[in-house]
Image (spheres, rainbow, N blue to C red):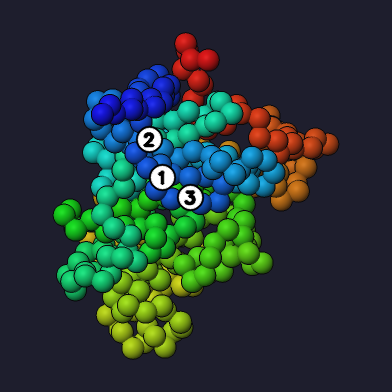
Amino acid sequence: MTTAAPDWLDLAYADADGRPQSALATENHQILCAGGSRLRELQLSDGSRVWQVILAEDAASGAGLTAGFERVDNEILAGLRLHRVVQRHGLSYPVQLGQLVGYEAASAQPYALLRPWRGQPASVAIRRMQPAERERFGVSLLKGLSWLAAAGISHRGISPDSVRWDYELQEVQITDFSLATVTGAPRTGIGRQPWAGPEQRPGSAAGYVSDRDDLWGAGQLIYYLHSGELLTGPADLRAQPHLARVIGNLFSEPASRPAAREVLAAINVSDPVPAQSREDPLERGRELFRLAMAGLSQAAMPAGEAGPAGVGAGEAGPPRSRQRRPRRWLPRRPAGRT
């Protein structure tokens, strides 16, 4: 009896540093699908495994295709920003975050390659977590969110499904950046109750994305892990003062919520992010973008500074077509790839 030869996939992609790479891979199995994209496990010819975020087969056109492209793009965006903020100081990649291996962003079939996620979703892990592990979970989650803030990323999907618990390392891992965006972008109604704050929910989304947006979900998740129940209101917290001391301020308006590093400081835990990593050279550009989106004219901007491309006075923004070209935040396609 002969065994059929595997169907090899020929991968040509850029790694997180933008360097061209190639590999042969076979598909082990599909893991999950979500909103126009799907996640599948690949085994490379060297025996290692990666998870690949690709467009779903049924995302052939229209809203499904647009959602699929956005989800793949968001994984790449978050992965690259996190890689760069860590690399800037020669640090090890944080165990609390899912990690980008590589990406292909210029073809009609873009994809992101991820290191396999570790542990179990919090929705599963809660069944056998010990009290000390629940305490460790909250600290580890806040450390991961501090790194996201330093990279200028908001996850926008913190929940028991996207945050996992690794029993071996005793650390969380924040995964699934398919809804992520940069801080300072206009908010959209993308979140789901009870994990998303009111500022992220359909019908009430307003203002601009902040690193504090994810803190609402973090507070909900920490409460859920400790109590096994969903937080329904202030009375629930009053009944558990030890939790209220840590997460009580996370359910206020976004501007009043403490940052993750401030919550860590309040419980005497050191912020894992070097202070200099929080300097953001793009903030001035984001401010100009906010001014333009608020309807201000080019004349209202400082002399010699142009507004964002396609949003100046008298210009319409670019059409929302999904032509496959690298997004502005992506490096140029490596030479030699077609």
Nearest to viewer (mark 3 / mark 2):
2
SS state under label 3: strand
Q: Which numbered disc, 1 or 3, marks the residue closer to the eye?
A: 1
Query: Measured from the top left, where is residue 239 in percent x and y?
Result: 33, 88
Residue 255 falls left or right of residue 247: right
Say which residue appears at 43% left-offset and 65% top-offset.
217
Q: In the figure, 161 relative to 229: above or below?
A: above
Q: Circle 3 is placed at which residue position?
A: 33
Amino acid type for the residue under numbered disc 2: Glu
Looking at the image, do the residues carrying marks 2 and 1 touch, with CB atoms under 8 Å apart? Answer: yes
Amino acid of disc 1: Gln
Residue ID at (58%, 58%) = 190
Report the front residue among 71 and 221: 71
Mark 3 nearby-residue class (10 Å; few <14, some 14–19, many ≥20): some
Residue 30 - label: 1
User: Label 3 is placed on what type of residue?
Assistant: Cys
Can you give x and y, in whole percent of width and height, for residue 39 in the image?
A: 43, 44
Cα separation, mark 1 vs mark 3, equals 8 Å
**Residue 218 location (% of width, % of height):** 39, 65
Q: Which residue is mark 2?
A: 27
Q: Disc 3 to disc 2, how far (Cα)?
A: 15 Å
When asked about the image quadrant of residue 28, the answer is top left
* Crowd tier of the residue under label 2, counting other residues whose Cα lies within 10 Å: few below 14, some 14–19, many 20 or above: some
Q: Residues within 10 Å of mark 1 (few under 14, many from 20)?
A: few
**Residue 265: horizontal and vertical position, in percent?**
28, 62
Which of the 4 quarters of the picture holds residue 91? top left
Asked if the residues shown at circle 1 and circle 3 are in contact, with their CB atoms under 8 angstroms apart, the answer is yes
Of 59 and 156, nearer the camera is 59
Residue drawn at x 19%, y 58% as measured from the top left: 167
